[in-house]
Image (spheres, rainbow, N blue to C red):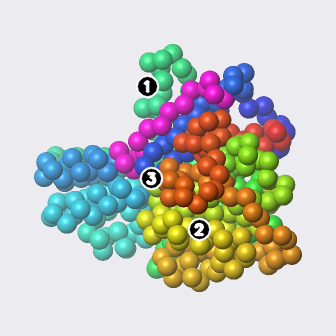
Amino acid sequence: MVGQETVDRLLAMDVGAGTQDILLYESDKPLENCVKLVLPSRTSIVAGRIQKATRRGKDVFLTGNLMGGGPSVSAIKKHLKVGLRVLATPRAAKTIRDDPVEVVEMGVEIVDQPPRSGVVIVETCDVDLSALRQALALFDVQLPALYAIAVQDHGEVIGGGSNREFRFRHWERFVEAGGSINALAYQVVPDYMTRMKAVQRDVPGAVMMDTGSAAIWGALCDRQAAAHQEQGLVVVNVGNQHVVGVLLQGERIWGLFEHHTVLMDTAKLDDHVQRLKSGALTNAEVFSDNGHGAAIHPDYSTLNPFGFVAVTGPNRGMAEPLGYHMAAPYGDMMLTGAFGLVAATRRLLEGA
């Protein structure tokens, strides 16, 4: 219920492909003085443990929860390629593919228990509160009771079909329904967003967001970006794996596109942003270029095109030659998503 809970201490965690960016928000401190951490992501850690097992010639058993793939799945494929075994519990196997049939076809063995010996056990999860609790305890810092966590969730796709297309349908429905940024933070997660659901199993009660959504909210914590919010602006997050650009005015997203960072360069990024502004960017062309898609509400054509562009994300350097504003809320670009999680959670719980 909006306005029913005061957010005094909140751990905000933005889980990306390369890093997990963490902010311990405390309402009685300036944000600049709150505890901040930029750590390797859990999928990077899991990938490293699998790679170590590969070098040792050891089979791997994955156990734990569904988590993000990326580096970890790449390490699994390389492990299998050299003739070593990968075994996984049914839940951990969903890290690799939603459909267990596809997982088995890749060569992974789905089992309930590991062999008695000769296997390296690797735990899968996006959030390891135990490790974080131990690390912070060394500095006499205790974890709070409230959490807000962002992950990128493609949604569950079983029986074939494109997870890129499935994920973008979620964005399309959001734009068609009015695009309120207040709808981007969840206490109750849609059933098909299985990665978010998995995080809530590990962290009960956590407020959940998509990483792209958290970056959008976070960019609005930048003063120059916020100054253009009512007039309208483009917000672009150039992440380690994905680029998301949105048309935002007030608290409404009028349109957006999502692509893979590895398939973008400076010229293509500028082209996509300019044609997003004009309303000319199409879903078909982005999807056919192996991106996720584009969606622009038809009523956007009645507005004056938004001129100001704010860019954030660890690969924002791609946009530096373009003269866009490099958003850095509270002077710390890497915590943009975490700042966004705090702002969105405060709006959700306090109405702030």
Q: Dot 1: few (<14), some (14–19), or many (≥20) neighbours within 10 Å?
A: some
Q: Tell me which numbered mark, 2 or 3, is placed earlier along the sequence.
A: 3
Closer to the eye: label 2 or 1: 2
User: Looking at the image, which is closer to me, 295 or 48?
Assistant: 295
* Residue identifier under label 3: 17
Residue 44 on image: x %, y %? 37, 48
Residue range in magenta is 31-45
Q: Is residue 311 above or below residue 345?
A: below
Residue 295 on image: x %, y %? 68, 74
- Residue 277: image quadrant is bottom right
Q: Could you tell me which secondary element the residue under label 3 belongs to?
A: loop
Residue 192 on image: x %, y %? 59, 65
Q: Please tell me whether residue 109 belongs to the stretch shown in magenta.
A: no
Q: Quadrant of the N terminus?
A: top right
Closer to the eye: label 1 or 3: 3
Q: Tell me which numbered mark, 2 or 1, is placed earlier along the sequence.
A: 1
* Residue identifier under label 2: 270
Q: Quadrant of the C terminus?
A: top right
Amino acid on which disc 1 is placed? Gln
Q: Residue at x 45, y 45 (%)?
A: 19
Label annotation for residue 170: none
Residue 346 on image: x %, y %? 75, 39
Q: Could you tell me which secondary element the residue under label 2 belongs to?
A: helix
Amino acid on which disc 2 is placed? Asp
Rounded to the nearest whole Å, what is the CA distance between mark 2 and mark 3?
A: 24 Å
* Residue identifier under label 1: 134
Is residue 239 left or right of 230 when viewed as pictured?
A: left
Q: Could you tell me which secondary element the residue under label 1 belongs to?
A: helix
Q: Tell me which numbered mark, 1 or 3, is placed earlier along the sequence.
A: 3
